[in-house]
Image (spheres, rainbow, N blue to C red):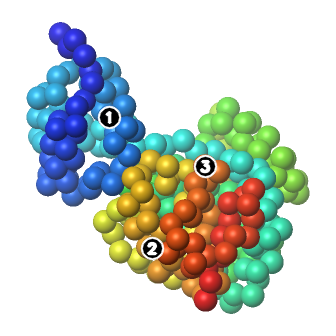
Amino acid sequence: MIETPGINEPQLLELIELVSNRHGFDFSGYSRASLKRRLSRIIMLKKIGFDQLKQLLADDPKFFQWFLEEITVNVTEMFRDPYFYKALNIQVVPNLTTFPHIRVWSAGCSSGEEVYSLAILLYLSGLGDRSFIYGTDIHTQMLNEARNGVYAQRKLDSYAENYRHAELPGELSDHFEKMNDAARVRGDLRKNTLFSAHNLISDAPFNEFQLISCRNVFIYFEAAMQQKILQLFYESLSSHGFLCLGTKETIRFPEMKNKFRLISSKGNIYQKIG
C-alpha cells in the first residue's frame, strides 16, 4: 500500500535520466512542479510505488506510451480562443498572401484540432492550395488521431461555438463529412497536412516556415528551455515570418525580444525581424 504518492527531487532526476537513456525523451527542461504533479498522479492511478514505476518505464513499451500521454498535456480544441483566430485573420493572413508558398508549423499539435483550424482559415482566405501545414508532437497515438481527422459530434458541437465567435463565414460543419456520431475533416483540407513526430527539446529545425504556432506549450517548460525553443522557432521562420504563442506565454528574454516585434497583444502574435 502506498502512503504518499509524492515524488521528491532525487527521484524525479532519476526518472528523467531513465526515460532519456531508455527511450530518448529528454524531460530535463520541463517544469519541475508540473512533472512532480503528473508523476504523483500516475503513481496514484496505477497504485504502484516508485520502484515499480521505474521497472515499468524500463521494460514495458506500452506502459511508456501511456505514461507519455499522461505526463504531457493534450488539451486542445478547434478554434480555441476565437479572438486569436480573428487577429490571425485580420493581421496575419493578408501578409501571408505575399508569399508564393505558405508553410505552417503547428508545434505540439496533439490530436490535430489546431492544424485543421488553420487549414480551414487558410482555405476561407483563398490560400488553401498554396499552403502546407505540418503538425508535430511527441505522441504517436495523438498523431494517429490527427491524421484520421475524425472527431466526435459532442466535441464538434463545442467547437462550432468557437467557430462562430471567430466570426468566420458559414458553419464549422461545412468543413466536415458526417459519419454517424462523428465527422471527418474534408479531404481537400486534409491533403495539404502532414503529421510527424518531433521533439521540441532535442530535435533540430526541419524546414523554413512563414507561420509557426506553438500555443500553451511553453508554460510547461523551465525558462532555459523556453529560450532554447524560441531560438529554434526563430531559426525555423522565414524572414518576416509569424510566431503565435498561448495566452499566458510571452517572449520575455531580452536577446529574443530584439528578434521579434509584437503584432497582436491580445492574440499574442509576433513577427520575426529581418
Task: Tell me the quarter of the picture where residue 64 sits.
Answer: top left
Judging from the image, what secondary structure is the residue with disc 3 in? loop
Residue at x 28% of width, y 53% of height: 28
Measured as percent of width and height from the top left, residue 215 is found at 58, 55
Task: State the residue at coordinates (75%, 87%).
Answer: 98
- As drawn, the label of residue 231 is 2
**Position of residue 28 in the picture relative to residue 152 (left or right):** left
Q: Residue at x 66, y 36 (%)?
A: 155
Mark 2 lies on a secondary structure that is helix
- Disc 1 marks a residue whose amino acid type is Lys
| Kind of residue at disc 3 | Lys
The residues bearing labels 2 and 3 have C-alpha atoms spaced at a distance of 19 Å
Residue at point 50%, 62% (across, down): 107
Marks 1/3: CA–CA distance = 21 Å
Residue 118 in percent (x, y) is at 67, 62
> Residue 171's spot in the image, x, y percent?
84, 49
Q: Using the rendered view, name the quadrant where residue 6 is placed.
A: top left
> Can you identify the residue that label 1 sits on?
36
Decide: is 243 above or below 14: below
Work out which quarter of the rendered image holds the C terminus and state it.
Answer: bottom right
Residue tagged 3: 248
Q: Amino acid at mark 2?
A: Gln
Task: Examine the rendered structure and indicate whether residue 82 appears above or below residue 250.
Answer: above
Q: Count residues near mark 3 (Cα–Cα under 10 Å), then give few for <14, some for 14-19, many for 20+.
A: few
